[in-house]
């Protein structure tokens, strides 16, 4: 049906944008660029998990998406604090 | 019908946010593109998923909680990264730096 094609196309678009941002993570000029790329990729992975949960009809994956979002929040705050106290030269 | 419009809007916003992260010249402008486009696109796609699926109300409530947490957490983390990047020593490529006026 039409809804299934819409969900699968959204999945492929999200994977494509995550692969575009991987360039910024690998070849970022400074450390904050890489952290911005990692944060964006993790948010995209949360949305990908939600889309896969609706496609497959296995709704327990939503709990995994919520836990991954919370881990992303804590990791981002710890990386920001690390950048703040380690000022280079 | 409305879920198709929401899903296509979220996809377009995600693609433009990725282009902004690739093409902008500075950490702060990249952070602007990342947090704004990513939060709006993710919330739009999750609202479309709520309208599409046929599931009990508890599962829809879980998706609403996920959208609310994205709207709360993503700006907080981006604000912390911008503050840490300024303290780390990355200077913004702008003419007027108002943060340096307030915090010498």
Image (tube, rainbow, N blue to C red):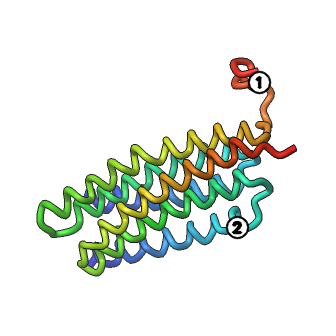
Q: Which residue is drawn at 39% across and 46% down?
A: B71
**Horizontal side of residue B27 vs B17, given as left or right:** right
Q: Residue at x 46, y 61 (%)?
A: B11
Residue indicated by mark 1: B96
- List x then y, in percent, for residue B31: 62, 46
Identify the mark at residue B5; answer none if there is no mark. Answer: none
User: What subunit carries mark 2?
Assistant: A
Query: Which of the 4 quarters of the picture holds residue B92?
Result: top right
Residue occupying the far left of the picture: B56
Which structural element holds mark 1?
loop
Residue occupying the far top of the picture: B102
User: What subunit carries mark 1?
Assistant: B
**Horizontal side of residue A17 vs B41, given as left or right:** right
Q: Residue at x 20, y 60 (%)?
A: B60
Residue nearest the observer in this picture, B6 or B56: B56
Residue indicated by mark 2: A23
For the C terminus of chain B, the image quarter is top right
- Picture layout, residue B68 above or below residue B103: below
Query: Which of the 4 quarters of the picture holds residue B5?
Result: bottom left
Query: Which of the 4 quarters of the picture holds residue A46?
Result: bottom left
Dot 2: few (<14), some (14–19), or many (≥20) neighbours within 10 Å?
some
Residues marked 1 and 2 touching at CB (< 8 Å): no
- List x then y, in percent, for residue B2: 26, 56
Which structural element holds mark 2?
helix
Residue occupying the far right of the picture: A89
- Picture layout, residue A65 above or below residue A29: below
Q: Give the tally of numbered discs.
A: 2
Q: Disc 1 versus disc 2: distance between alpha carbons?
A: 30 Å
For the N terminus of chain B, the image quarter is bottom left
Residue nearest the observer in this picture, A88 or B8: A88
**Horizontal side of residue A81 vs A71, given as left or right:** right
């Amino acid at each position: 049906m039409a809804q299934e094609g819409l969900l699968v196309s959204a999945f492929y678009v999200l994977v494509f944008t995550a692969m575009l941002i991987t360039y910024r993570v690998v070849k970022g000029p400074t450390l904050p660029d890489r952290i911005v790329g990692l944060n964006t990729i993790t948010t995209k992975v949360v949305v990908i998990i939600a889309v896969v949960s609706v496609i497959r009809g296995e709704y327990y994956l939503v709990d995994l998406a919520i836990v991954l979002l919370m881990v992303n929040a804590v990791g981002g705050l710890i990386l920001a604090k690390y950048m703040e106290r380690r000022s280079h030269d | 019908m409305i879920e198709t419009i929401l899903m296509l809007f979220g996809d377009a916003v995600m693609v433009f946010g990725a282009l902004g992260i690739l093409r902008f010249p500075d950490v702060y402008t990249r952070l602007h593109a990342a947090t704004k486009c990513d939060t709006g696109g993710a919330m739009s796609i999750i609202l479309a998923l709520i309208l599409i699926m046929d599931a009990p109300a508890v599962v829809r409530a879980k998706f609403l909680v996920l959208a609310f947490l994205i709207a709360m957490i993503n700006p907080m983390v981006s604000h912390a990264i911008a503050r840490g990047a300024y303290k780390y020593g990355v200077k913004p490529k702008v003419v007027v730096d108002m943060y340096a006026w307030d915090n010498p």
